[in-house]
Amino acid sequence: MQLVSSMYPCQDVPVLVFRQRCTHPCLYCGLYKYQFPEDKIITSGRDNIVREMSKYKGAYFSPVTDCFLPENCELTHYLLEETWKMSPRWVPLVNTKQMIPEKTIELFARKSHELVLQISIPSSDEELVSILEPGSAFVSKRLGMIKELTTAGIPVIVTIMPWFDFGKPEELAKKLSNAGVKRTLILNGILTETQRKRMINSVNMQIKSVAESVCFVKEATENGYVLSRERRIKSLTQLIDTLTRFGILARVCICDNHDLGDTKLPLCGKFKHHNFEN
Ligand code: SF4
């Protein structure tokens, strides 16, 4: 495995690249096979990574695979525990769609002030998500785990990602609220031609119809297909208003929405979290 220099302009922390990548990738994902160029690699090997990672304020687990794939769970736990031993104020940003093992949840409960935990859910529609994210945990399981985490005093930021306007914002907001979620980050997602075709070939009519309706933009982090500006503004406004009614704070990642700077949407262009600023 490798530790690689930051890959997002808004987060100045290195990222973890596991050898074991997602075997059943999400239909929209363009990163699961991504190989970083040599000049981006800071170090490799488990113990070198722990040593090197502890010198930074934090690290991102993990942008190009899920760090809680069953094959990655033990390694993820080891890296977290050992790096915290070397640097108790170190703050990992952990994002997953998988189930987190109980012993790691216990570790998180002890380190909740030195952690930013994100769990990703694109929709409350179980069937749709099982097709969109075939290798990930059921939405009901993710929500059950979030409830367990928030009950244990571990705040969870839900990344609503990708937001393809699949509808039912009320149902999603209600389920998040019941699970104790107070904060969300909405990411629209940019499709490459390959990912768009994979979605067009889906058996699910909603996924197919979204992929057929996206349009090409150049203004994002990379060129690709997103929902039209008009549709993003309308559906994001509706989603944010609904989340707000349920007492949930929502921000929209600017990466896929550079063309929305002239709107009143709460865009987020810099990774900020109070645990990170301690
Ligand atoms: S879990 Fe993450 S890295 Fe893996 S395929 Fe899905 S989006 Fe890509």
Image: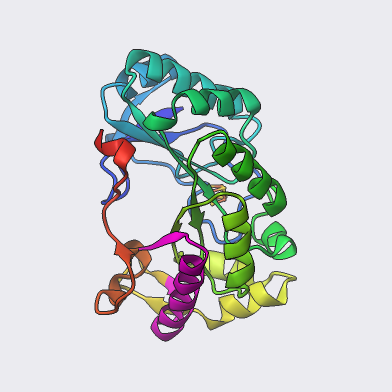
Q: How many marks?
A: 0
Q: Quadrant of residue 252?
A: bottom left
Q: At 51% across and 71% down in the image, what residue appears?
A: 242
Q: Position of residue 245 (x, y in %)?
A: 49, 69
Answer whether residue 216 is magenta in the image: no
Q: Position of residue 43 (x, y in %)?
A: 33, 24
Q: Quadrant of residue 210?
A: bottom right
Q: At 33% across and 26% down in the image, what residue appears?
A: 90
Residue 251 or residue 261, whichever sits in front: 251
Residue 127 relative to residue 62: left or right = right
Residue 147 or residue 7, whichever sits in front: 147
Q: At 56% across and 33% down in the image, what residue appears?
A: 152
Answer whether residue 242 is magenta in the image: yes
Q: Position of residue 123 (x, y in %)?
A: 61, 63
Q: Position of residue 6 (x, y in %)?
A: 30, 41
Say above or below: 113 vs 174: above
Q: Main secondary structure of the magenta part?
A: helix
What's drawn in magenta, residue-wise? 225-252
